[in-house]
Image (cartoon, coloured by chain):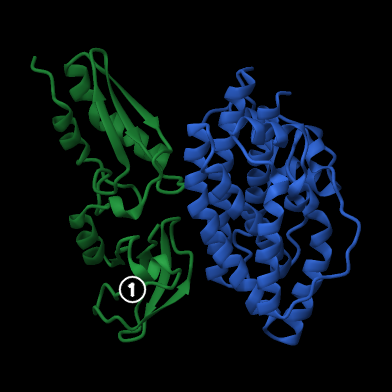
Amino acid sequence: MSPRFEYLLRLGDDALILGQQLGFWTGHGPVLEEDIALTNIGLDQIGQSRAWLSMAGKEEGQGRDEDRLAFHRDQHEFRNALLTERPNGHFGDTIARQFLFDAYAVPLHDALSRSRDPEIAAIAKKCAKESAYHLKHSRGWMVRLGDGTEESHDKVQQSLNDLLPYVGDLFVSDVSTQTAQEEGWGVDLATLRPQWEATLESALTESGLKRPKATPEQLGGRLGRHTEQLSFLLAEMQVLPRTHPEAKW
Amino acid sequence: MVKRTADQWWQLLQAVPDPEIPVLNVVEMGIVREVVPDQSRVLIKITPTYMGCPAMDAISDDIQEKLREPAQQEGLSVDVELVYAPAWTTDWLTEGAQKKLEDYGIAPPGKTADKRTLQGEAPMVRCPRCKASNTEMVSLFGSTACKAHYRCNACSEPFDHFKCI
């Protein structure tokens, strides 16, 4: 697998898995506005995923398009960060997961919009507008829940405690990300961590939430080592195109 | 048969409405970026408003349908290509489009160079019905990817605001 194919898969899979998860909220949001908000964000994620995976397919050169990559790979071939496959849980869990991801997506898209590769830069510039909007939404809710009632505070604090051990994948630095940086078409994802930390700290301060004591980081998504949750998600996402592989709408 | 110029193809495209906001056509929306007629085909480059905009396929089909016959008259095929750069911005909505949106009941986006937008503050949004500026945002997200949900405090009506991006 070329470093570039690997890199594009990671970008595409993060967005795809998160988008699929948010889609499960359709009809289940706590209030109508948030039902619509979460599914809108999910739609943006799927759209971003489509662009990255389509590019990944071209890079690989084996004739796989974005649908082939999304629907006909097995769990160990997915490269999404473990954070994105954590269960939806309750609204606070979903918001905390989205916030931790958005705080990474904003500096990521900003950095990629300066890519030496015009296609990567173009897609990233488009994504940047969307991720900034998503962060506004998820950060707003972190503050409202954290600084809300005792119950909302305790619940979202627990969400943070549960999710923080899974963010490490986002900042893994390896051959793929280092090649991206050296060749100038991408960014070494490890370099995004200080900006992510700053966004997190500012939201914690404003919301009265606390950073839990350091726990061991759970890593593996970038290597295709996933949690059980991903297999359930893929089963649901892939069943239709796998049952009817050549079906056209 | 006289070949149509790019301008004439642009004119034909004005008959293709946006599927989600039918009061505007795809040219007014700023979705059509380039029209390149050559010897064998007419190439239409379109750009999505949002990455996941589900209307893009419908727009592509609608353009194909609208241009197929005129293209056939010239022995041309119609190709629609999706491009991402430069990224779509609400600044590409034509002046007329902003007015049409408001008349249709959707508060138009304003310009991204607006100082309040640059400073990250909520922009002032005027109620498209009673024109009062005493409005509040209900949700950052509305009925489609490109809209946010507002309420007018003067006439109490809910309305959509076209997000400024």
Chain displayed in green? B
- Of all chains, the one bearing label 1 is B
Residue for badge 1: B125
Chain displayed in blue? A
Image vertical order of residue B25 relative to residue B148, above or below: above
Task: Note whether residue A70 is visible.
Answer: no
- Residue at figure coordinates x 44%, y 73% from the top left: B121
**Residue B24: x percent and y percent?**
25, 51
Q: Which corner quadrant holds the N terminus of chain A?
A: top right
Task: Note whether residue B100 is visible.
Answer: yes
In the picture as drawn, the residue positioned furthest to the right comes out as: A216
Q: Quadrant of residue B157?
A: bottom left
- Residue at figure coordinates x 29%, y 76% from the top left: B127
Q: Is residue A73 left or right of residue A63?
A: right
In the picture as drawn, the residue positioned furthest to the left comes out as: B2
Image vertical order of residue B67 relative to residue B25, above or below: above
**Residue A89: x percent and y percent?**
76, 63
Question: What amino acid is labelled 1 in the image?
Answer: Val
- Residue at figure coordinates x 83%, y 67% from the top left: A161
SS under mark 1: loop
Q: Is residue A50 left or right of residue A157?
A: left
Q: Is residue B160 left or right of residue A122?
A: left
Q: Quadrant of residue A22?
A: bottom right
**Residue B43: x percent and y percent?**
30, 25
- Residue at figure coordinates x 53%, y 33% from the top left: A116
**Residue A5: x percent and y percent?**
66, 28
In the picture as drawn, the residue positioned furthest to the front comes out as: A182
Q: Quadrant of residue B74?
A: top left
Q: Is residue B81 left or right of residue B22?
A: right
Mark 1: give few (<14), some (14-19) or many (20+) Cα within 10 Å: many
